[in-house]
Image (spheres, grey):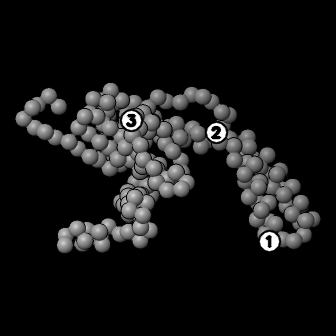
C-alpha cells in the first residue's frame, strides 16, 4: 500500500475469511471482495463453524417434525382414527427420545477473528430481484444457514446466476445472455 511504484487493486469473488477485522479495513483502498447472498466460504472460520454447530445442536425441531409427520399422514390416509393413533405414537417417541437429546440453549459462542478481505460488496436475493450493497467485513462473521449456502459459492449456480439475474433486471431484458451481449460488443 505504501509503495508508490505500483498501483494495484484486487477484486475477489467469494474470498474466504482469512484476515483480521483490522487488516480487512486497512485493505479497503485496494481490495474488493464480492460476496453472493449466503455464500458460506466468506463466512467460514473455526469460530463460525463451531457456532453454527452449537446452533444446530440446540435447535428444537420437534414441533416441526410433528407437523411434517401429521401432514404426510393426512396425505396418505383419510381415516382420522388412524392419524390420531399414529400421531400419538409419534408424539411419544419425539418427547421420550428426541427432545431430551436436544442441547439446552447456551449463549456461549466463539468470537470470530477472521473475515473476508477489504471492501465487501454483498449481492443478495431480496424476494423481488437482486440487491447489492457495501457491507462491513464483520457482517460476514456468522454462517447464514440456507438452502443455497453452498451453491452460492459456485460459479454457475452462484456468482454467474446472480450476475445474470442482475443484468436481466438492469437491462430490462428477461432473456439477456452474457454470450450474446459479448458478441454484440465485438461487432
What numbered label is drawn on residue 58? 2
Against 54, residue 65 (above or below) is below
Q: Nearer the viewer, mark 1 or mark 2?
A: 1
The N terminus - image quarter: top left
The residues bearing labels 1 and 2 have C-alpha atoms spaced at a distance of: 32 Å
The residues bearing labels 1 and 3 have C-alpha atoms spaced at a distance of: 49 Å
Q: Is residue 81 left or right of residue 14?
A: right
What numbered label is drawn on residue 76? 1
Q: Secondary structure at mark 3?
A: helix
Crowd class of label 3 (few under 14; some 14 to 19; many from 20; radius 10 Å)? many
Q: Is residue 172 visible?
A: yes
Q: Quadrant of residue 3?
A: top left
Residue 30 percent location from the top left of the image: 23, 37
What numbered label is drawn on residue 121? none
Q: Earlier in the sequence, mark 1 or mark 2?
A: 2
Callout count: 3
Residue 158 percent location from the top left of the image: 41, 58
Against 176, residue 3 (above or below) is above
What numbered label is drawn on residue 137? 3
Q: Is residue 161 visible?
A: no
Amino acid at each position: 500500500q505504501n509503495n508508490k511504484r505500483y498501483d494495484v487493486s484486487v477484486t475477489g469473488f467469494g474470498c474466504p475469511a482469512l484476515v483480521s477485522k483490522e487488516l480487512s479495513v486497512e485493505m479497503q483502498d485496494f481490495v474488493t471482495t464480492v460476496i453472493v447472498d449466503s455464500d458460506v466460504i466468506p463466512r467460514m472460520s473455526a469460530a463460525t463453524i463451531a457456532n453454527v454447530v452449537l446452533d444446530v445442536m440446540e435447535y428444537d425441531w420437534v414441533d416441526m417434525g410433528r407437523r411434517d409427520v401429521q401432514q404426510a399422514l393426512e396425505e396418505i390416509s383419510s381415516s382420522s382414527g388412524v392419524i390420531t393413533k399414529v400421531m400419538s405414537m409419534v408424539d411419544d417417541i419425539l418427547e421420550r427420545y428426541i427432545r431430551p437429546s436436544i442441547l439446552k440453549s447456551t449463549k456461549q459462542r466463539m468470537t470470530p477473528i477472521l473475515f473476508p478481505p477489504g471492501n465487501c460488496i454483498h449481492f443478495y436475493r431480496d424476494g423481488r430481484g437482486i440487491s447489492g450493497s457495501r457491507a462491513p467485513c464483520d457482517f460476514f462473521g456468522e454462517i447464514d444457514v440456507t438452502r443455497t449456502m453452498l451453491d452460492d459459492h459456485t460459479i454457475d449456480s452462484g456468482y454467474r446466476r446472480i450476475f445474470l439475474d442482475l443484468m436481466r433486471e438492469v437491462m430490462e431484458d428477461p432473456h439477456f445472455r452474457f454470450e450474446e451481449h459479448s458478441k454484440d460488443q465485438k461487432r
